[in-house]
Image: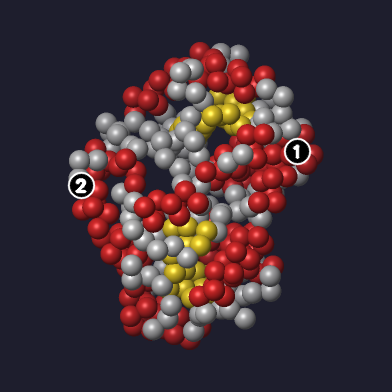
Amino acid sequence: MIKLAFILDDDCYFKGGVKPILDLALGLRRLESNPYLISIVSSNKLKEDINNLFPELDVYMFKSKTSFLCKFHDLKPDLIISSDYPKVMKILVQIKEDLKIRVGVYAHFLFGINTFYSRSKSNIKFRVGSLVPWRLLAYEYKETMEKIDVAIANSYTIHYVLIHFYGIRVNGVVCPTVGINFHHFTDILLKEKLDHESILVYVGHYPDYYIMDICKVISEFASNLKVNWFGGQAPNAECHKFIRDNELSKLYTSSIAAYIALAWEGFGYLGSELLLFGMSVLVDTYQPWLEGFHIETGAVKVSDPKENIVEAFEKLLNTPKDMNRARKYAIELYSAELSARKLLKIMRRMK
């Protein structure tokens, strides 16, 4: 049996660097594997949440680098996997050098890529970064990735970008499982929407002036609807920025449609997750999860640059939809077991 260990690098189980890894670990457990979770962040709340919500998973927490190095030495896993955040990859490289254990990265972050898409007036990092030559910007990320034994992309888009933008060899693709294990929804809850008169707007990495345009247009369009805003760039303090999954489930079930404002997305995690909740989705950039099957259901619309958001929303809401088919695709294609099998297949090829 292949022994896998995962590094958790955040203190919240529902954050982007931890959530997909937990879902993968749950899938592995269902396949009779026993993955280990090692947190490099000292957080009693993280440990408590995982123990309460996912008691089948073993999680270890250490306050010092020496302690978790000792634990890895004792566990002797076949592979240790982390996200591709630069500071965590450096820890992986040290583990490889000190303990002679193979290490892998689950790539989704891609340091530097946002400078192609984000030109925020309020974000000095992206403004300055967009002026730096690409090879210089990506140099350290690429150099660290080349020391990693196994590189796994979380989508075919990320796979393409890693190869053609960064020049990094990729061992395979394992899609995230879009919150299937995190959101305890039921068919009854989906049929009985809490509020049929609301729409959901997610605002991610976009310039501040664009966000204000969205606010204005959505407010005019939704004068007779309630608008629920969320996301890291949500326009005011009353909006939902970082939400626990039980609260996110309620937010999802309270709306009939959603608009996703993202300049860059490597997988389209949010859109696929919204489809699980029977929600129509409007996006204004082509995202990896839109390849064919969701478009056919009528549940998703990509906004044409020539039309405004109001026109796009009206077309989306008036299009005949097969939401059950959209949900079925999302559940089947992004199940934890399927992703876990793909990961184990990559591992077996590496032996």
Looking at the picture, does residue 251 appear above or below residue 196?
below
Q: Residues within 10 Å of mark 1 (few under 14, many from 20)?
A: some
At x 45%, y 22%, the residue is 305
Residue farthest to the bottom? 74
Looking at the picture, does residue 241 appear above or below residue 65?
above
Q: Which mark is residue 324?
A: 1
Under tag 2, what secondary structure?
Answer: loop
Position of residue 258 measured from the top left corner of the image (x, y, whole percent): 58, 30
Question: In this image, 152 relative to 330: left or right?
Answer: left
Question: In this image, 86 relative to 187: left or right?
Answer: left
Looking at the picture, does residue 119 appear above or below residue 316?
below
Alpha-carbon distance for marks 1 and 2?
46 Å
- First along the sequence among labels 1 and 2: 2
Position of residue 292 measured from the top left corner of the image (x, y, whole percent): 61, 39
Q: Is residue 108 visible?
A: yes
At x 32%, y 40%, the residue is 116
Q: Which residue is mark 2?
A: 133
Position of residue 43 measured from the top left corner of the image (x, y, whole percent): 45, 63
Q: Amino acid at mark 1?
A: Asn
